[in-house]
Amino acid sequence: MRLLIMGAPGAGKGTQATALAERYGVPAISTGDIFRHHIRNQTPLGIKVKALIDAGEYVPDDVTEEIVASRLAEDDCAGGFLLDGFPRTMHQVHFLDRYLADRGQSLDAVVSLHVEPDALVERLLTRAALEGRADDNADTIRRRMEVYAGQTAPLIFHYESKGLLVDVEGTGSVEDVRERMFDMVDAHVRER
Ligand code: AMP
């Protein structure tokens, strides 16, 4: 199973990504987590991307794509993977399409988690307080949501036109959303 999960900041993407990856026995790969790991460890990459991430801006495509390519080349991705937070731009979409095509592979489903903007801001402020994430303050949240909205629409359209999109309503309890998502992904994969 080769899966993507997309969703605005605060849509519960990380939590549902973990659940989805476990269900299908594939590694969950979060580019945000990889970047945060590098920042914590003050690697050259971490030092390079910290200011951008703290400001709610995207890391450049070439940097992000290189990280993903080397992660997908690891042994645990041979049987599939779930990408969380990648691709986020059309450049990254085309990169991934090419990367997979070169290996005779393709995606099975692209899950899009949908939550109303007001509910998102509320969730993000709660998370900022709980986790102390430096990139979760009101200004950064607003900036990240603008960036997300502006850049994601064409991605959704691309995957929809390829018949890969599984649009999941992300409002409700974590358990409800998870069951809804499992049912929809299972049905999608069965129909393919
Ligand atoms: P996330 O945890 O997925 O919300 O990612 C946190 C931050 O990491 C984002 O706000 C971006 O600054 C950066 N980031 C993560 N994934 C990507 C990506 N695919 N392209 C560019 N920047 C990314």
Image (cartoon, rainbow, N blue to C red):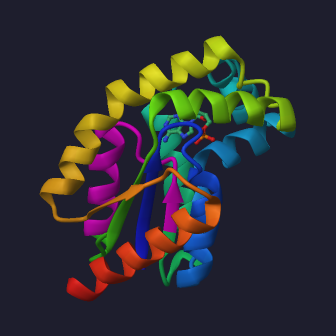
Q: Nearer the viewer, residue 126 or 46?
A: 126
Q: Quadrant of the N terminus?
A: bottom left
Q: Residue furthest left?
A: 161
Residue 88, magenta (yes or no): yes
Residue 6 visible in the displayed image:
yes
Residue 28 visible in the displayed image:
no
Q: Residue at x 19, y 49 (%)?
A: 158
Q: Residue furthest bottom?
A: 190
**Where residue 173 sits: x, y (%)?**
62, 58
Q: Nearer the viewer, residue 158 or 169?
A: 169
Residue 95, magenta (yes or no): yes
Magenta span of residues: 82-101
Q: Residue at x 63, y 43 (%)?
A: 32
Q: Residue furthest top?
A: 139
Residue 150, by quadrant, is top left
Q: Residue at x 44, y 50 (%)?
A: 6
Compared to residue 130, the image places residue 34 above or below, namely below
Residue 185, by quadrant, is bottom left
